[in-house]
Image (cartoon, grey):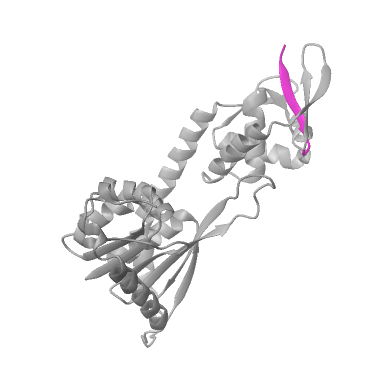
Amino acid sequence: MELAVEKQNSDLIKVYDESSDSTRFVKRDRGFNKQLTTIEETLSRFGLLKNEIKVYLYLARVGEKKAGEIAEAISLHRTETYRILRDLEKKGILFSVFEKPLKFTAIPLDKAIDLLVDAQKMKIKLLEKEKANLVELWLTMPQIKVDKVKKELFQMLEGEQQVVLKAEELLEKTEKEFQIFASDEYLAQLYYSDFTDKLKSLQDKLDITILTEKTPKSLFFIQQMDWPKHKLGIVEAQSLPCFMISDRRELLIAFHESDTSSESGDKKKFKTAAIWTNYSAFVWTLQMLFSKLLEKEKTMTQQPLSEIEIS
């Protein structure tokens, strides 16, 4: 017996048996919802819009459908549904079936992701090729003479990727000294984003010091990094944001914001945001905090990490 999802509300899902044309309602599976939400969030990173994702996932799960059936099942206007189907077909993740009436079918999720990833790679390559032409064109235009006066600035960033990219930019600009305080959660983010590999590659060039909190998770990542003990501090500090100071002139401070879009009853979700600034008073304040934390637990790293007790 083949059952297909037809229509959804907050608590029930309407399904029907194609062979007997009978329908029934079943209670929504909360575990299934979380899995589907994760897939939707991931697909959105590949450039698909919310309704495009809904159409694709519906077809990927239920098989061939007419445009009218799709529109009714996911509560979209037919005109918008036709437009989305054509756009997804152009992206290569849907096919039209040569039947009357016309039907549509989706390629498997793994193949769709491969196509979307390849498309993003091609866009990046094209942008890289265009960079030299754009810069050359810009320089041929008359330039307005502007007096260069150093000003204290700040910049807001949102999203883990943007924050890591800014951290990498800050690290590349550093000439002498780079200081980091990262709690276990942020240390994990930096480790999995390969930022810590960039830190290790600059050990001989820059004076880099890392402070982290005294938790089993932090100690695990420090051991994985094999960071020099004399450039490491393990401190008693909770609820502090991650911050990085470059040459005592620039500061990047990252923090987690609660994601209010998560469904009630689900585990709280967080998104990463950050502020970059060269505001001297702010940089000095965080520099003093870093120095105080380092002094407080300066001797702790003299003993093997495996012997440090975690309370």
User: Camera-side residue: 137 or 45?
Assistant: 45
Residue 288 visible in the picture: yes
- x then y, percent, for residue 209: 26, 64
| Outermost left residue | 204
The quadrant holding residue 203 is bottom left
Our reading of the magenta stretch's main secondary structure is strand
Residue 190: in magenta span:
no
- x then y, percent, for residue 301: 24, 58
Which residue lies at the image location 46% right of the left edge and 41% below the top edge?
A: 119
Q: Is residue 163 left or right of residue 196?
A: right
Figure check: 202 above or below 36: below
Q: Is residue 21 left or right of residue 29?
A: right
Figure check: 117 above or below 201: above
- x then y, percent, for residue 71: 76, 35
* Span of residues in magenta: 1-10
- Quarter of the image with the N terminus in it: top right
Figure check: 249 above or below 135: below
User: Camera-side residue: 163 or 20?
Assistant: 163
- x then y, percent, for residue 127: 40, 53
Which residue lies at the image location 46% right of the left edge and 75% below the top edge?
A: 154
Which residue lies at the image location 38% right of the left edge and 85% below the top edge?
A: 145
Residue 102 visible in the picture: no
Q: Is residue 40 left or right of residue 15?
A: left
Q: How many numbered marks are there?
A: 0
